[in-house]
Structure formats: C-alpha cells, structure tokens
Amino acid sequence: MSDLPSAKEVFTRPLIKDNPVMIQVLGICSSLAVSSNMKTALVMSLALTFVTAFSNLIISSIRKYIPNSVRIIAQMTVIASLVIIVDQLLKAFSYDLSKQLSVFVGLIITNCIVMGRAEAFAMKYPPVLSFLDGLGNGIGYGIILCFLGTVRELFGSGKWFDITLLKTVNDGGWYVPNGFMLMPPCAFFLIGLLIWLTNQVYKINTKPEYDTSRKDAS
C-alpha cells in the first residue's frame, strides 16, 4: 500500500533520529545497570534486539486473530516465550555472563521498548515492516548501550572487552582509573548528556512517527 512507510525509513529512524533511549527515553534501567563493561552491554543489546524483532514479527503475523480485549496478554506471552529462550541459551553457553546480567534478561519481558513496539507498530503494520521496526529499535538501543559500555569500561578500568588499552598505575602504567565510571550514576549522567546533545542536533518532532490513525495498515 502507498501509505505504508518505506522499509528504509522504518529501519533507520530508530537508530538515531527516533532512538528509543535518547529520544523516547525508554530502557533506562537496563542502560544504567548493565553498561559497566562491553561484554554485558553487547549481550544485553543482542538479547533485546532478538526479542524485539521476533516478537514484532510474530505479533504482526497473528494480529488479526488476537481479540482486542486480550491483546496485551497475547503480546506478553509471545515476548515472555522469546525471553525464556534467550535466558536458557545464555545459561547454557555463557553462564558467567548470565549471572552478571542477573534479573535484567528476565525484565526484558516488561521492557518499554519491546512492549511499546508491539503495541504501537506490530499490531498495525505487516510482518516484514514490523520485523524491521523491532530490529531498528533493538540496534538503536544497542548503539547507546555499547557506547556507554565502551566509555565506562575504558575510563573506569582502562580495558575494553577485558583487553587492557590504558595501562593503569597499579600495573606500572600512567592511567589512574576513574572508579565513578563503573557506578550506575555515571551512566545516568552520560545518558543525560547524550539526550542533550541529540536535542541540539535533532529538534524533537511532535508529529507521530507514522500514521497511527488507522486500526490496521495491512
């Protein structure tokens, strides 16, 4: 249909211009908690991207068969099933990372990014566009999380992916690690700075991102 947004627009818009963290201010809790190093940041990004993309795809595919009165329950069932798959895979193949991420993998079920895209996009648009929307939002979230993980790990411990890049004074080098970088309040201030910078570059658009006036843009 001619009134459908283009696939390119759907995928690229959440990367920067309508980023779920910087513009929509969603997913803040996990951004604060799991971005102290790149490993946990990257794994959390991949997990949320997988869940968001495939939950959108599944929900969009069955949207015409979901009664309006139980749509939230249906969405959460799909999302929870995907989160369980991710959680069990993590425990099976990377138990240490699973322990570091703690409850935050399970909390993807209630993540506002995942629930928001399912309700606002997947319930109204075709499966392929919905998948791209979920993929774009997941990657947009991951960009911010990996940026935070890089900055916090590098300046907090002199490492990146546990590889020493800045040799600390304790190891005979010159760099003095900033312990504040590894604390959640640091991530809060960094996110605030990113939001401010983004608002200077992109003026907030008060119009809806897509046409939401229709019940189903199939």
Image: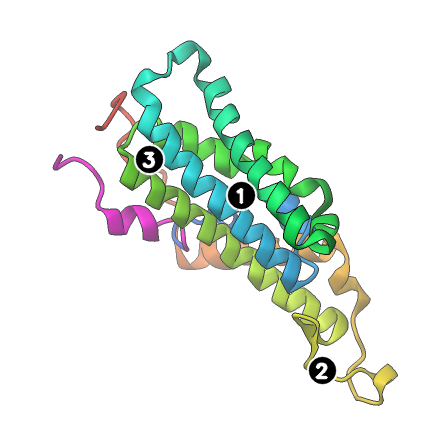
Distance in Å between CA atoms under marks 2 and 3? 45 Å
Mark 2 or mark 3, whichever is nearer to me = 2
Question: Vertically, is 122 above or below 30?
Answer: above
Q: Which residue is mark 3?
A: 208
Q: What residue would you read off at disc 2? A: 166
Report if residue 99 lies within the magenta region: no
Q: Nearer the viewer, residue 183 or 129?
A: 129
Instruction: Read off the residue under disc 1.
Output: 25
> Where residue 174 sits in the image (x, y, percent)?
79, 88
Marks 1/3: CA–CA distance: 16 Å
Q: Amino acid at mark 2?
A: Leu
Quarter of the image with the C terminus in it? top left
- Contact flag, marks 1 and 3 (Cβ < 8 Å): no
Magenta region = 1-15
- In the rendered structure, the answer to whether residue 195 lies left or right of residue 121 reads right
**Dot 2, crowdedness within 10 Å: few (<14), some or many (≥20)?**
some
Residue 133 bears which disc, if any? none
The kind of residue on which mark 1 rests is Val
